[in-house]
Image: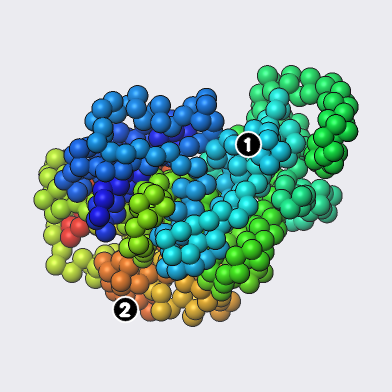
Amino acid sequence: MANILGLKVTSHDTGAALIFGDRVIAISEERLNRVKHSRNMFPEKAIDYCLAAFKLSPADIDLVVLDQVGSRAESPSERIWKRNVGERFSKAALHVINHHDAHAASVFFASPFQEAAVLIVDGSGEKIHSHLGMIGTETETLYRGEGNVVAEIQKTVHVRRRLRFPYSMGIGKLYSLLSEGYLNFGIYNEGKMMGLAPYGDDRVLREFPFDRWFLEKNGHIICNPHVTFPGIERFVGTKKMRHAIKESIFRTLEKWIFWLLDMCSGRKKEFFLAPDCFKPIVLTKPARQKDGSPLDPYYTAVAYAGQKVLEEVMVLFGKKVKAASGSDNLCLAGGVGLNIDANKRFLDDVGFKHIFVQPAASDTGVALGCALWGAHMILHLPRFYKMDSASLGRPYSETEIEVALQERPQGISFRRSEHVASDAAKLIAKGNIIGWFQGGSEYGPRALGNRSILCDARVPDMKDIVNKRVKHREAWRPFAASILAERQREWFELGESSPFMLLAAQVVKEKQKLIPSVVHVDGSCRIQAVTSEANLPYYQLLKAFEKETGVPLFLNTSFNDAGEPIVETPKDAISCFFKTDLDCLVIGNYIVTKSL
């Protein structure tokens, strides 16, 4: 088989993936350069990491596949690639593919399905020509996957002019507008709004029902771009606000021009009057200040509205792709695929029997998608890969771990354990918060038992303890649970397996009081179901904890401090261990404590 290098070289979450025969390795640049999301940072370290893992040189690569974000004319990925690598990969064929195609390949070709509906929903992808010949940005694409082929069914493109969102927008951008612009959670933090939503009520939705937020037009689902609030200029910028004023002046003239075009071309006028699809939504309370409480009832109501709107839009897209594909299986990727509450509704309200969500659903997974597209859509290779585990990083040897431990002789005490799962389970059961470092790192934003912080969910105030001592994040945000897969249905109202922590479900009522630190305010919990086949060391830890306590789950959160990428190397893990108030670090077969 060919050696295929897949890359994301522009925008946020750059990274690399490499297919070597039937083996796959993948990593985000942020894990190596320690800059979260690594926006517009060429993935040089990630490329070297992948090559070194398989002992390859650039001359051994047969095919390089890049995705394209934004305009090919203004910021072509090919130019970025050539500027950074020169002639190093001159023996490799180079292909640049569509951003959503990369997402689709990342999920379908990694799924357990031979046929499936494929839905990609994100903020924005490549700039392309719409069906009207106007340049716009893709936001949602529907596909059908079968065998080693994914075929596009429909793509929604939103045209932008002088305003940031002048005509319509996708659900990803609408959700970001509320999260980043109104609730002021910052860029790439939409998960915070999802966590805040259960605290809210429906007062905003009563004032602005669903049909004010989104509608279906000409076979596409579009969202209202005319959402405004006091303080919006901080989000869109004063320059864009000046453009907004100019837009209002020119809009009437533009309508007359389009009317004349309609008369000449015979097109229906409604195609050109998209700005009139929606009435403005005006949120009366000013945008939240950084030091303002998000638990203010109006802010929680906005979060609730945004979450419910997103769920309804996703249900509509789900019904469309199910009807078009005729499949009972759904593959989901794009940044919106990380919304765990919306994901469950594909099972509950759309009628899909099985769902596979790419654990690196956001742009983090694009590099893998590029490599898999190259394998199946360019080279037409048969399917060979199924993502049973998200551990696509390289493992670190015991020698590498020992060297990292010995490099920090002061303030550290460590011992080798012959029964590391049993010893670690006892530590957790005694109330300790441990860092858990095993095997290769997980691909994507979720820690799934290779780079995790673990503690006992039975302790009523453990969530607050973890936040205060280790994670330093908002107290109202929930934590997830890792559970033995065979015990999932005993503890959660969920039949479908959730291996990658991308589904939420209600905790069985009589169990809620037993694990209070992972039960959210609405009685739900984000779930990771663990099998021995996918992650044997982590499964053994859960089994040992069950033997110790009678409870087959514990709290699992990512091994990092707030604002930092998840740790990658033994050195990263030891550094984070010392910067935070973790009690113990279990790294490989070593148990590490801080000496007095």
Q: Is residue 545 above or below residue 272?
A: below
Residue at the (54%, 31%) spot, across then down? 71
Depth check, front residue: 200 or 337: 337
Crowding near pointer 2: few (<14 within 10 Å), some, many (20+)? some
User: In this view of the protein, which residue sits in the foreground, 4 or 346?
Assistant: 4
Q: Secondary structure at mark 2?
A: helix
Q: Amino acid at mark 1?
A: His
In which quadrant of the rendered view does residue 234 lie?
top right
- The residue at the point 48 percent across, 64 percent down is 146
Query: Where is 359 relative to 362, above or below?
Result: below
x and y percent of residue 212 in the render? 81, 48
Residue 218 coordinates in the image, percent (x, y): 76, 50
Q: Quadrant of residue 586?
A: bottom left
Question: How does the figure colour the protein chain or chains?
Answer: rainbow
- The answer to whether residue 360 shows anywhere in this view is yes
Image quarter hosting the N terminus: bottom left
Q: Which mark's residue is nearer the viewer, 2 or 1?
A: 1
Task: Tell me the number on the disc at residue 129.
Answer: 1
Q: Of callouts 2 and 1, which one flags the residue occurring earlier in the amino acid sequence?
A: 1
Picture layout, residue 292 above or below residue 490: above
Tally the marks: 2
Instruction: Identify the residue at image location x=64%, y=63%.
Output: 324
Q: Which residue is mark 2?
A: 547
The amino acid sitting under disc 2 is Lys
